[in-house]
Amino acid sequence: MTKSYDFDVLVIGAGPGGYHAAIRAAQLGLKTACVEREAVGGVCLNWGCIPTKALLHAGEMVHESKQAADFGLTFSGTSLNIGKLNGWKEGIVKKLTGGVSGLFKANKVTLLTGQASFVDDHTVKVGDQTHTAANIIIATGSEPATLPGITVDQQVIVDSTGALNVPDPIPGRMLCIGGGVIGFEFAHIYNNLGSDVKVIEFLPTVIPGADTDAVAAFRKSMEKQGIKVATQTKANRAEKKADGVHVELEDVKTGAKTVEVYDRVLVAIGRRPRTDGLNPEKAGVTVTDRGFIPADRKQRTNVPHIYAIGDVASNPMLAHKAMKEGLVAAEVIAGKPAEQDAVAIPGVVYTSPELAWVGLTEAEAKEKGYEVKTGNFPFAASGRAMTLQSTDGFVKMIVEKDTDLLLGVHIVGPHASDMLGEAGLALEMAATATDIALTIHAHPTLGESVLEAAEAVHKQAIHIVNR
Ligand SMILES: Cc1cc2nc3c(=O)[nH]c(=O)nc-3n(C[C@H](O)[C@H](O)[C@H](O)COP(=O)(O)OP(=O)(O)OC[C@H]3O[C@@H](n4cnc5c(N)ncnc54)[C@H](O)[C@@H]3O)c2cc1C
């Protein structure tokens, strides 16, 4: 006898992972509900990817308006209305989150509003209602990690959510604690808007995990633009005083301590999976010491009809990974042969220049035992980059020496994130550097630099001297 449930699929969380899972499940004919306690669209649409990219664009326009003097365009009497800037950013968020709600309606996904908590492995409580489902997908996401000794008030000491609210006036002195993707994106925004910004990072390198050559070029460009960067430095405590936030910094190597004063401090030291109030233990679902709900390649937890996707399941905490995992979970439930089997998950820092990568770094490739060849093509030699006044950085391509098989592509440069699509497809299709070099790329485009990097692997790039 088969039991009957209210829903075939109940998704907890309407972030990128959750809404992808819900829409795909409904497309496949499953009766689907999605529970959200705060805002449809999750972190990415409301407090993450989208609002940061809006502010990055605005900051970039400020920067470009100054650069335009190089070709004789000068502006006088320009001003930035901070209220309008924040409102414009929020308008984009509203449009997109409204779009997701509209897609739920169009696909007949039932949106349940409230805090979801497990009652048992087929039952979830939302407010004072209980709902049963044959399958449950946990997509509760993540939240900012905190630092002892530094209390976030979302006014002068902020996490990424507070930093999205640009204050008027713009802070004079700003400290970003954490030299990861989020720390640098905000550093870049505020630097372009006029703050004097410093980034500190505990580790010896910023953007840990990215290719070291690319990171070096990225850091150089950020410093050239006025952002101060200190690695192997940690913040011990922060105290609000009349003249600003006094932050005690410590040199990790020597133990030397100094106090610096800032108008705004951003804590961006990472994110942790979020399961507060969910009670996964009532469903028998395993949660690791670090708070993750581990899942297999079909996104199944230890309880076979309960799935976990996105930030709550594993690193890297990226929207496109959550989206893919949402589709996999829904398709597996619908009986399709789906699996999370991506060759590589791209990573991007949306500064200008951007830092973007897909596949193995040179160090990772060597660690895995590959003998590698690399090819570099600098944007300084790209006609298109010159016309865009953005010549910092390069494309670095890593291939296996004997087979020419593509292993990784790392780009520091303008619109690097958009160039990454080609590299990702090439990796998925097991392309060689020769395949890329033989593909006609439009001229003049930034994408030609990917072709030239492939040629450089064979010491046959045309627009640079091959060494
Ligand atoms: C400042 C910032 C910038 C970012 N920029 C990028 C970027 O450019 N590109 C990128 O790929 N990634 C970016 N990210 C990361 C990206 O936002 C996350 O990887 C993505 O949102 C994860 O999606 P998710 O569906 O797993 O979870 P989330 O987006 O965190 O969504 C989870 C949802 O579940 C809800 N929820 C949680 N618990 C419950 C419960 N018990 N009951 C009901 N609802 C619940 C939450 O309210 C939330 O809406 C950024 C993150 C931040 C903070």
Image (cartoon, rainbow, N blue to C red):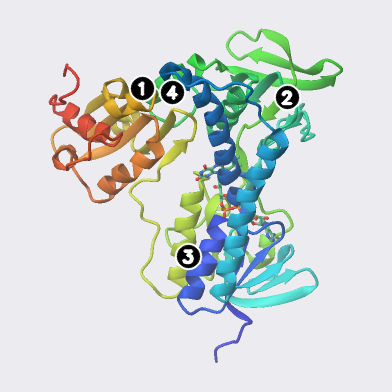
| Mark 2 to mark 4 CA distance (whole Å) | 24 Å
Q: Residue 443 placed where, x, y %?
A: 22, 36
Q: Which residue is mark 4?
A: 218
One can see residue 292 in this view: no
Q: Which residue is mark 1?
A: 391
Q: Earlier in the sequence, mark 2 or mark 4?
A: 4
Rendering quarter of residue 54: top right
Q: Which residue is mark 2?
A: 264
Residue 150 in the figure: left or right of residue 52 = right
| Mark 4 to mark 3 CA distance (whole Å) | 36 Å
Eyeballing the image, is 447 above or below 73? below
Q: Secondary structure at mark 1?
A: loop
Q: Earlier in the sequence, mark 1 or mark 3?
A: 3
Label 3: how many residues lie within 10 Å, few (<14), some (14-19) or many (20+)? many
Q: Earlier in the sequence, mark 1 or mark 2?
A: 2
Indicate the quadrant containing the N terminus: top left, top right, bottom left or bottom right. bottom right
Q: Residue 275 placed where, x, y %?
A: 67, 54
Q: Residue at 47%, 28% (x, y): give it.
A: 352
Q: Secondary structure at mark 4?
A: helix
